[in-house]
Amino acid sequence: MNIPKNELISVLQEFNPWWSGQPLTDLPAWERTAASQIKSWCDNLSSNRSLLLSGPRQVGKTTLFRQAIRTLIANGATATQIIYITFDHPLLKLAGIQKTLETWEELFPGTSDKPQFLFLDEVQFVPDWQVWLKHQVDFQKQRKIAITGSATPLRSGSTESGVGRWETIKLPTLSFKEFLKLRKIDLPPIQELTSLRQLLDCDAGQFAQFTAVARKLMPYFHDYLLRGGFPEPALENDLKRCQRLLREDIVDKVLKRDMTALYGVRRVIEIEKIFLYLCYHDGGILDISAISKELDGVKRKLLTDHLDLFEATHLIYSLKPFGYGKEVLRGKSKVYLADAAIPGSILLMGQKLLERPDRLGNAVEAAFFKHVFTRFYQDQPTFSYWQSKGRKNYEVDLIAEIGERIVPFEVKYQDKPINDSDLKGLRMFMEERGLDLGYAITRNPESLFIRQPHSTRQGHLRELIKGQIIGIPACLACYWLS
């Protein structure tokens, strides 16, 4: 289709107001943590590696790009050497990358002879974008190209050709600390820990200070679990409106738009039914056969395919059982929703979430997993869960493997004090593998402890194992991991 050039120019000028000297006045001054990574990429002109910013819808990817452009211009970059294109726009999607860039270079002759910054949004809507980007990185050395996408074609389609050509930033929903900053919560200074392991070196006085901080953080942490980490809904003071925005703008658009546009899904009712099941069982271990029967005979193949699509569009995280070999490959997956507030908003729970220990515990577990995932993503960890064998199953909620290091976490979000019996699964796992450290993520601000646990082996129950368990209130753990 022949698109009139003047219409294409008009759309580009609307998305690139800096070309005519207009400031980016609608951007917040506050920036997400990922902004520093994007700035480092922009500053590194000696490398022409591209940047892939991947994450759910409405999580702030476009805002981060526009803030990066604002910084570039403030630091002296030539405005006409910077272009922002969103392929969510029908005209730009129809024109495609090449025609749009040719129009830009005709509008500003000579731009191709100098360093250029290209910010391409929602690139998953462009056919064969991977091939185009590969050629750009290989042959257009003057171009620094950053792209975003809300679906995994951005990830899976780029794996083979992307090695050595681009780097990836995984952008989840807001961390707890980012949520506090966004909502302008004023708190007294909190001692920062670069690793939870540093608690081993803290004294009783510091523990008392941390407990006092946890008391102040806890109500805000519960508010975070209710509102979630999507920036626009999280800013809403009215909780009902906040959760309605989560349902309509985040979940519905992914289920009813991305699933059909990107993957050709036509039976939206089935995909909604499966997603509703996941909201009821957030953090649960999925038995595909049982779910198929429970959902009125939804076929196993369709169910498995749709779970893959939920992960592709960043709506869920999936964990395999701990271990290696066929047993693990065939094992049941454990699934967390992408944001702790999604199940509550879908199930219309509102404040009642805080009165339901089971639902609240699931939300805390999902939030904590997201913080661990984000913190260690660059180290390429493997995440899994563990269950004991035998009549009575004991479990470890989350295990992070980074190289040779294995770190287990157990979430026990309960009012009563945490004792050894509450942590039997964690103790058993640590003892079997000779681990020196495990973590219990707790509820009460007073549940901050370092404990050497007892053995779980029959006949040795009074013996202490060599490892230690650090108990940390969830609000503090998520704050530090932010």
Image (tube, helix red, strand yellow):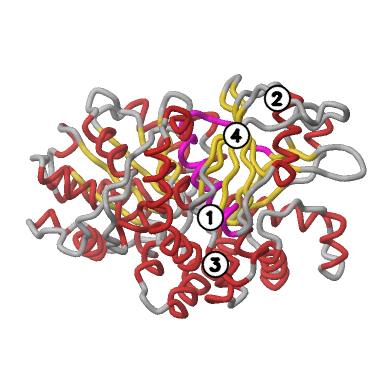
Please state which of residues 13 and 78 is positioned toward the viewer in this rendering.
Answer: 78
Mark 1–mark 4 Cα distance, whole angstroms, equals: 16 Å
Q: List the residue tagged with mark 1.
A: 444
Q: Residue at x 15, y 51 (%)?
A: 107
Lower sequence index among marks 1 and 4: 1
Q: Which of the two discs, 3 and 1, sits closer to the camera?
A: 1
**329 horizontally vs 99: left or right:** right
Report whether residue 67 is seen: yes
Mark 2–mark 4 Cα distance, whole angstroms, equals: 11 Å
Residue range of the region highlighted in magenta in the rendering? 362-384
Query: Is residue 167 found inside the magenta-colored segment of the image?
Result: no
Lower sequence index among marks 3 and 1: 3
Image coordinates for residue 478, horizontal then vertical, percent: 46, 48
Q: Mark number for residue 451?
A: 4
Q: Mark number for residue 340?
A: none
Lower sequence index among marks 3 and 4: 3
Q: Amino acid at mark 4?
A: Arg
**Quadrant for the N terminus in the image:** bottom left
Lower sequence index among marks 2 and 1: 1
Report whether residue 382 is seen: no
User: Which element is circle 3 on?
Assistant: helix
Please state which of residues 3 and 27 is positioned toward the viewer in this rendering.
Answer: 27
Give the main secondary structure of the magenta stretch: helix
Answer with the quarter of the image where residue 30 lies: bottom left
Q: List the residue tagged with mark 3.
A: 251
